[in-house]
Image: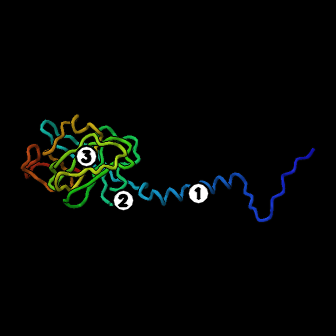
Amino acid sequence: MTVRPAPVPAGVLVLPAGVLVFLVGVLVFLAGGVAGAAAGETFRQTTLTIFTDKARLTLPVELATTSDQRRQGLQGRRMLAQDGGMLFDFGRSRPISMWMKDTLISLDMLFIRSDGVIESIVEQTEPHSLKIIRSKGEARAVLELNAGSASRLGIRAGHRVAHRIFDRAPNLPGTPRAGEPSARSE
């Protein structure tokens, strides 16, 4: 007995399975590229230093400076290095609002003024929340750290963050004075 394929009606396109899988893959890729245009953002690596009452902490951070980078932020990340973070630079001082949409991990958000002083801290944010998280006053930047980091590292409002985006405030305790080497990083 010989098995013959069923006849194909006129006007129907028959594609080999491999070609069909390829075309479906291309469609999924294109749909993802349009729907999640910001998902491909890359972030510059840098360091910053936080001067607390008891320590000088130098932390590796990713820098988000463009609107697409700030929009993407840490969304979709399943983890963040223990003492790593992301520094969002808004370019000028203003009231800042954030949210946790599509953010999978709980964070501490440090709102930082243009002089590098931590204006306020919101700890233990809720993943996926659409609740608006606001600075108490004007801030230039937000540093996002793993939830619990601010408490664990002894970071509180009033402490200073040194990084090239902030104005120098040499009279704060623990900050190098004029003529001394600066802790300011890249």
Question: In the rendered image of this protein, does residue 36 appear above or below residue 78?
Answer: below
Quadrant of the rendering where the N terminus is positioned: top right
Q: What element carries label 1?
A: helix
Does 9 sit left or right of 110 as displayed?
right
**Colouring:** rainbow
Query: To which quarter of the image does residue 66 belong?
Result: bottom left
Residue at x-position 8% and y-position 49%? 177
x then y, percent, for residue 43: 35, 53
Residue at x-position 38% and y-position 43%? 104
x then y, percent, for residue 169: 10, 52
- How packed mark 1 is, by other alpha carbons closer than 10 Å (few <14, some 14-19, many 20 or more), is few
First in sequence: mark 3 or mark 1? 1
Residue at x-position 53% and y-position 59%? 30
x then y, percent, for residue 90: 25, 58
Residue at the disc numbered 1: 26
- How packed mark 3 is, by other alpha carbons closer than 10 Å (few <14, some 14-19, many 20 or more), is many
Amino acid residing under circle 3:
Met
Residue at the disc numbered 3: 109
- How packed mark 2 is, by other alpha carbons closer than 10 Å (few <14, some 14-19, many 20 or more), is some
| Residue at the bottom extreme, as displayed | 11
Q: Is mark 2 on a helix, strand or loop?
A: helix
Residue at the disc numbered 2: 68
| Residue at the right extreme, as displayed | 1
Along the line of sight, the residue nearer the viewer: 154 or 99 = 99
